[in-house]
């Protein structure tokens, strides 16, 4: 994943706007066919957001990663729609979170118009949850959403060391993680040019600080979080993901499903038990 990030360095960077300002334009999206009619038993369409793991054939990657979840949603009469967002070059979620959230706003409106639904549910993995939270809090998405169901979400942000996965930068005495942590280092913009979405996932970024300021959640939305103790991307595991606010359900995958073993960050959505958990949360009041 990080190799793809660095390969995108030739893409012109776009400055992230102020929190809540009009987003930038330019990144691509992948929209599914809106050809499903929700059942009376599950009237809310479900918008599904993946994270940074989708590189190259983004549609195939997302379909494979979310297959168990989409199957489970269809099994209860629901309509799952996997949305690809923030696409720059071969990678999803590379655009600034603010831009991706604006794309999500547009897509939710299309889903509501196509299905006649007043509200949707959102299922999101990793950085997809950061985009969803931005949409809910800063773009007035709350009145359009009933449930936000998150798998290993970026909430408080992660560290530079885990984001780059141990890669180094030849010729840089502080290393790649040091460059990433130093906003004044000129190498930062050149190395991570075009992938502001990755920088937004860092603990202490403008996005994570703004979302945590005053609380992540918005009234009227039910939030559920499933983290994994085997998370090698969001660290500390659990702490980086949990939304520790009233009414939020926070669980570790391994505590709920001890027989399943430990799940990694990218593999969590593909765990059958995690898919069952998503369906349970979508059915919750």
Image (cartoon, rainbow, N blue to C red):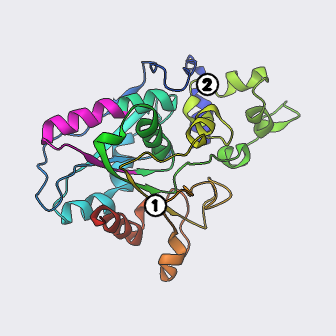
Residue at image coords 55%, 33%: 197
- How far from the left and from the top, in percent, is residue 178? 80, 37
Residue plotted at (10% across, 58% down):
40
The boundaries of the magenta stretch are 104-123
Q: Position of residue 105 (x, y in %)?
A: 34, 32
- How far across and down, in percent of the image, does residue 200 sit? 59, 35
- Badge 1 is on which residue? 247
Residue 263 visible in the displayed image: yes
> Dot 1, how many residues are within 10 Å of its Cα: few (below 14), some (14-19), or many (20+)?
few
Q: Quadrant of the N terminus?
A: top right
Residue at the limit of the structure toward the bottom, as seen here = 259
Q: Is residue 107 above or below residue 274?
A: above
Q: Which residue position holds label 2?
A: 9
Residue 195 coordinates in the image, percent (x, y): 57, 29
Q: Residues within 10 Å of mark 2 (few under 14, many from 20)?
A: some
Mainly helix, strand or loop, the magenta region?
helix
Which residue is more in the foreground, 9 or 258? 258
Q: Nearer the viewer, residue 93 or 155?
A: 155
């Amino acid at each position: 994943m990080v190799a793809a990030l660095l390969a995108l360095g030739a893409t012109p960077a776009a400055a992230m706007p102020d929190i809540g300002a009009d987003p930038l334009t330019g990144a691509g999206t992948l929209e599914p066919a809106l050809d499903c009619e929700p059942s009376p038993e599950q009237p809310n369409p479900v918008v599904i957001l993946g994270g940074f793991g989708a590189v190259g054939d983004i549609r195939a990657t997302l379909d494979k990663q979310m297959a168990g979840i989409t199957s489970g949603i269809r099994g209860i009469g629901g309509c799952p729609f996997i949305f690809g967002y923030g696409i720059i070059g071969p990678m999803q979620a590379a655009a600034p979170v603010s831009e991706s959230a604006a794309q999500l706003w547009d897509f939710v409106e299309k889903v509501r118009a196509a299905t006649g639904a007043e509200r949707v549910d959102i299922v999101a993995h990793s950085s997809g949850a950061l985009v969803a939270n931005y949409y809910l809090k800063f773009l007035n998405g709350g009145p359009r959403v009933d449930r936000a169901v998150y798998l290993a979400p970026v909430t408080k942000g992660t560290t530079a060391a885990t984001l780059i996965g141990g890669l180094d930068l030849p010729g840089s005495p502080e290393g790649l993680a040091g460059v990433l942590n130093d906003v004044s280092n000129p190498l930062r913009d050149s190395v991570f040019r075009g992938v502001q979405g990755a920088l937004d996932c860092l603990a202490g970024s403008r996005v994570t600080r703004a979302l945590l300021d005053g609380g992540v959640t918005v009234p009227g939305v039910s939030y559920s979080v499933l983290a994994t103790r085997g998370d090698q991307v969001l660290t500390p595991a659990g702490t980086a993901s949990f939304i520790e606010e009233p009414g939020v359900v926070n669980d570790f995958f391994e505590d709920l499903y001890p027989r399943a073993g430990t799940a990694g960050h990218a593999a969590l959505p593909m765990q059958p038990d995690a898919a069952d958990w998503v369906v349970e949360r979508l059915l919750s009041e």
